[in-house]
Image (tube, helix red, strand yellow):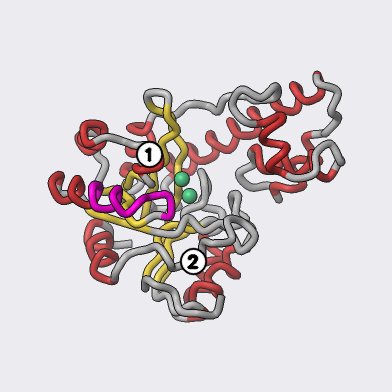
Amino acid sequence: MSKKAKYPVDLHCHTTASDGTLKPADLVDLAAGRGLRAIGLTDHDTIEGWNAAEKAAQKIGITLIKGIEINTDWQGREIHILGYGMDGDNISFKNHLYDLQEKRVLRVKKIIDKLTGLGLEISFEEVNGFSKGESIGRPHVAQALVKKGYVENTQMAFNYFLKIGAPAYVPRYKLHPEQAVRIIRNAGGVAILAHPGAQEISFKQIHELVTAGLQGIEICHPDHSPEQIITYKKIANSLGIIATGGSDYHGPEIKKDIEIGDWGVSMEDLANLLQIYDR
Ligand SMILES: [Zn+2]
Ligand SMILES: [Zn+2]
């Protein structure tokens, strides 16, 4: 863990503000300890981690890139849109985030109803206790099921109850990726397609999103094969959009082979991103 990160910049990290296990300040300290010069904080559907991370980043002397990852659905696939540099005080942006949180709460309540119907008793308060009030979702339901002794671990909770096709599955509220791109850009941010290789997004689809305002794609990501990295790099070049990258870090306990900063971008790539926004 103490060894130096492979990249100076990791643009894709999660904290306890969504489904990560490290607090924003601890994530920043870890990044600095591994020699990173900048990190992008991209919690799902929330910017609640920004302030604490910014304070920690200023103290320790690294650059914080304020970001977000918005979950959307498109043509039967889950598509994630990353945003960087939005104005966190933009009223319409804040309203959109509030709306997304509300829909997450509603979904969890429906899941709990289904679990109750199956004879598993967990309350919204128990689940909410695991989310610490931020970006509630299935991982927190899974943790509550483990705590209640219904399953041995969270993976089993997903397999038996929560994943697509399982008896307590409830589909997410579906946002179109173009809507996410608009939400990000209207707040002054840069919109990037996250890990396109994980969903095998084609050139044609990326082109369509670029027409709708997408400005770049994430290329260096643990879910991408070396071949995909080459393919997507070519796509980015041919469309004249920027390339980003990051580890999608969720904390030391989650995906143990993934270390912060072992996927990322060069200082030059960071400069390309910063050139588009000046916040
Ligand atoms: Zn993602
Ligand atoms: Zn992510």
Picture disc at residue 183: 1
Q: Position of residue 269 (x, y in %)?
A: 25, 64
**Frontmost residue, 68 versus 267:** 267
The quadrant of the image that shows the N terminus is bottom right
Disc 2 element: loop
- 250 vs 226, left or right, is right
Residue situated furthest top in the rendering: 117
As displayed, is residue 87 above or below residue 140?
below
> What secondary structure predominates along the stretch shown in magenta?
helix
State the separation of the CA atoms marked 1 and 2.
Answer: 28 Å
Residue 107 visible in image: yes
Residue in view at x 42 percent, y 40 percent: 80
Q: Which residue is mark 2?
A: 260
Disc 2 CB within 8 Å of nearest ligand 2 atom? no
| Magenta span of residues | 222-232
Residue 141 visible in image: no
Picture disc at residue 57: none
Q: Quarter of the image holding residue 6?
A: bottom left
